[in-house]
Amino acid sequence: MRPAEPHTETLNVFERLGLRWMLGRTRSDRPALSHWPGEVLESIKKIERSTLIQAGFLGAVSGALFGLTELGLLGWFGEDRGGATWSDQWPYWVMFAVFGLLISVAEIALLYWRILRAAGRVGALAGLDMDRDDVQRMIVLGMSRAALNMPNPRAEVHGVDPYSRLPRWKLIMYAVFYRLKVGATSMMVRLILRRIVARAAIRSIIPFAAIGVYAFWNIIITYWILREARIRAAGPNALRDLDELTKEDCSTLEPSERHLLFKAVGETVILSQDAHPNYVLLLGQILDRCGLDADKIEGEWDNQVLKDNKPDDKTRLVLLRTLTTATILCGSPRKAQREFLAEVAEHCGHQLNRDRLNRVQRGVYEGQGVEASQLDAATPVRADN
């Protein structure tokens, strides 16, 4: 497999810490990247449920500590928080902010530690072994990034730039919101809720009114993170199956057809607007299997190629199976990705069956990889063809 920079190189301190933690917890006696048996999938779900419960408990404890802090400060400064004006109240708000920051930092640190631990256990159950090669290292690094809620590197992947059509201002906003999703957003929810509750609740219980919201918010955030971690652990199963399904046909494709395949997958990656580690693996796998050099592939996808030159059965089979897998490889596909798959299928005399595509996506998410019949059913031949 091709090197996976920048996913495995030039790591920041948090990525290094996350990778080091995962390194010690992803060795397993299970076969590497095998389909997950029923008992393994159930164990993974049990880990996820337990982590969600603990995340909710942490949120509730955090909310209670915020309430106790406020009650203590009101008892110290009085109900008017030290005065009627800001100049009189600023000591109260400074102390509240300091205690609130300490509580939030402790909560987030414990939450991420628990999620990272859960991701490590999922990796072990999935059979990930860091001693095999750079590919495995990149998979586990991707899982640690997911567990730490860190974005993927904003860089090209084997010559494909997922962010090439994303305006710079949107890229900056995504990066800012990604980092604020847990910390600042949680604090804003708390402040807004306090403003609403303050008008309706009894004053003595106002400080504790948001405990349930804190717990619910933690559960939602943790669910998003654990879902992404599982996608990164399960994705390589689908890639292995896809390679087995297409390797013979790929070896007989003409150079122009191999370029067509790579560009089609590259278009799907660009439409995802995310340098997902599963896409790093897929693009590297295609380059290796087709004997391509990314630096020598010029231009991007052009629909006119399919319009002018209808691919033969072999090329069509490889193209649609690969593109279908790429569409669902990083979770629920974006609307633009589904539309692109439907458009390519249309040019090939096929059509997109979204229900079947969703079934393939669920199977990948549950560690079952992909099968030829499933992929073909997602883009069946048109009745009028």
Image (tube, helix red, strand yellow):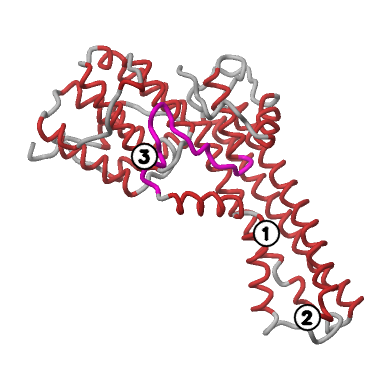
Q: Residue at x 68, y 55 (%)?
A: 56
On screen, residue 257 above or below 346: above
For residue 365, the mark is none
Mark 1 falls on what kind of element? helix
92 sits left or right of 254 in the view? right
Q: Residue at x 33, y 37 (%)?
A: 268
Mark 3 falls on what kind of element? helix
Q: Residue at x 23, y 17 (%)?
A: 255
Residue occupying the far right of the picture: 76
**Could you classify mark 1 by the number of other residues whose Cα lies within 10 Å: few (under 14), some (14-19), or many (20 or more)?**
many
**Could you classify mark 2 by the number of other residues whose Cα lies within 10 Å: few (under 14), some (14-19), or many (20 or more)?**
few
Q: Earlier in the sequence, mark 1 or mark 2?
A: 2
54 sits left or right of 169 in the view? right
According to the picture, the residue beneath numbered tag 1 turns out to be 215
CA distance for labels 1 and 2:
31 Å
Q: Earlier in the sequence, mark 1 or mark 3?
A: 1
According to the picture, the residue beneath numbered tag 2 turns out to be 86
Residue type, label 2: Trp
| Image quarter of the C terminus | top left
Mark 2 falls on what kind of element? helix
Residue 31 horizontal/vertical position (percent): 55, 17
356 sits left or right of 207 in the view? left
User: Contact (CB < 8 A) between labels 3 and 2?
Assistant: no
Residue type, label 1: Ala
Residue type, label 3: Ile
Q: Which region shows up in magenta?
A: 147-166
Residue 266 falls within the magenta-colored stretch = no
CA distance for labels 1 and 3:
36 Å
According to the picture, the residue beneath numbered tag 3 turns out to be 270
